[in-house]
C-alpha cells in the first residue's frame, strides 16, 4: 500500500545516512527511495549502514534536480524543522499518514528530506504542498535524517496497517495535477502576468511564491488546470490584440 510514496533525499553529504534511511524504510515496508545529487553514491558505507536493506539501495534512483525527482508526483511534502519567513501549510507525521495512506487517496506522493546541516531551501519548499514538521523538544529540534525518516515511515506504516489493501487507481476520478504540470502552469502564469504588466521581473519572487501557496493549498486536478491554462491563453491573446 505504500509503494505510491517516494522518500526523497536532497544532496545528502554522508553516504552512511543514505544506508540508514534505506534501513528505516525497509523496517516499515517502504521501497521507493530517490536521491537528488548525493555527494557519494553508491558507497560501501551506505551498504554497510543499510544492514540488509541492500535491495532498497539497489533500486534507488539518482536525479540531478529536485524538480526532476518529483515530476511524476501529485502531492509533495517537505520536511523542515526551521521556521520560515513565509509560512506554509503544515502537517505532523501522523496527520500526513492519515492523509496519504488512506485507500481513497492513494496518489503519487513525494516526502522530501533536505541536507543534513541546512535542510531544504526556500525555493525547494516552493515545490511543496505542505511542510512536514516533527513535534519534538523545542530547545533541541534537530533530528538525524534517518531518525526523521523513521518517524515518518512509522506513522505511514501504522496508518496503512489499519486499512484494507486495494488496487491503486483513480476509480474514474480526475487525477491530480503532477508537479511537472504545475511547474509548467506557474511558468505560463508568470509569463502572462508579466505580459499584462501585473508583475515586473525584478519584483516577482514574493508574488509568485504567494501565488504558489494559493494553488498548492487548492491542489488542482488536471481538468481544473486546463481551465486555468485556457484563461491564461485568452488573457495573452487579448493583450496582443490591444
Image (cartoon, rainbow, N blue to C red):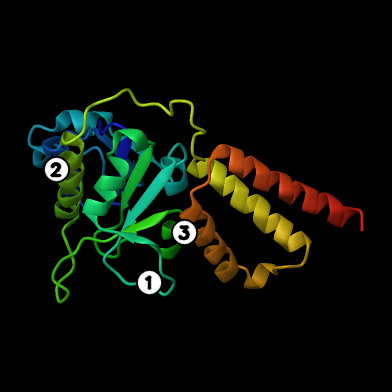
Residue at figure coordinates x 43%, y 26% from the top left: 171
Kind of element beneath mark 3? loop
Question: Which residue does the numbered mark 3 point to in the structure image?
Answer: 126
Q: Is residue 24 visible?
A: yes
Is disc 1 in contact with disc 3, using a CB cutoff of under 8 Å? no
Residue 195 versus residue 34 in the image, above or below? below
Q: Is residue 13 visible?
A: no
Label of residue 140 in the image: none
How would you rate the neighbour count of disc 1 (Cα within 10 Å): few for under 14, some for 14-19, many for 20 or more?
few
Question: Which residue does the numbered mark 1 point to in the structure image?
Answer: 84
Nearer-N-terminus badge (1/3): 1
- Relative to the observer, which residue lies in front, 171 or 21? 171
Q: How far apart in space, not on screen, are marks 1 and 3 (Cα)?
A: 12 Å
Displayed quadrant of residue 194? bottom right
- Residue 137 location in percent, x, y? 13, 71
- Residue 144 location in percent, x, y? 16, 58
Residue 168 falls left or right of residue 98: right
Kind of element beneath mark 2? helix
Nearer-N-terminus badge (2/1): 2
Q: How far apart in space, not on screen, are marks 2 and 1 (Cα)?
A: 28 Å
Displayed quadrant of residue 59? top left
Amino acid at each position: 500500500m505504500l509503494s505510491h510514496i517516494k522518500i526523497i533525499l536532497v544532496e545528502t553529504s554522508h553516504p552512511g545516512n543514505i544506508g540508514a534511511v534505506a534501513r528505516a524504510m525497509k523496517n516499515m515496508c517502504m521501497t521507493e527511495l530517490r536521491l537528488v545529487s548525493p555527494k557519494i553514491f553508491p558507497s560501501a558505507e551506505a551498504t554497510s549502514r543499510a544492514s540488509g536493506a541492500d535491495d532498497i539501495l539497489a533500486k534507488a534512483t539518482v536525479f540531478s534536480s529536485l524538480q526532476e525527482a518529483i515530476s511524476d508526483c501529485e502531492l509533495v511534502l517537505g520536511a523542515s524543522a526551521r521556521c520560515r519567513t513565509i509560512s506554509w501549510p503544515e502537517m505532523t507525521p501522523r496527520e500526513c499518514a492519515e492523509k496519504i495512506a488512506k485507500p481513497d487517496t492513494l496518489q503519487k506522493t513525494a516526502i522530501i528530506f533536505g541536507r543534513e546541516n541546512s535542510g531544504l531551501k526556500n525555493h525547494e519548499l516552493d515545490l511543496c504542498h505542505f511542510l512536514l514538521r516533527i513535534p519534538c523538544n523545542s530547545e533541541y529540534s534537530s533530528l538525524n535524517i534517518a531518525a526523521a525518516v523513521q518517524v515518518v515511515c512509522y506513522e505511514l506504516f501504522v496508518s496503512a496497517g489499519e486499512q484494507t489493501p486495494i488496487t491503486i487507481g483513480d476509480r474514474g476520478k480526475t487525477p491530480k495535477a503532477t508537479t511537472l504540470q504545475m511547474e509548467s502552469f506557474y511558468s505560463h502564469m508568470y509569463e502572462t502576468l508579466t505580459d499584462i504588466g501585473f508583475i515586473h521581473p525584478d519584483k516577482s519572487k514574493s508574488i509568485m511564491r504567494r501565488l504558489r501557496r494559493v494553488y498548492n493549498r487548492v491542489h488542482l486536478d488536471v481538468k481544473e488546470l486546463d481551465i486555468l491554462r485556457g484563461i491564461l491563453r485568452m488573457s495573452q491573446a487579448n493583450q496582443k490584440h490591444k
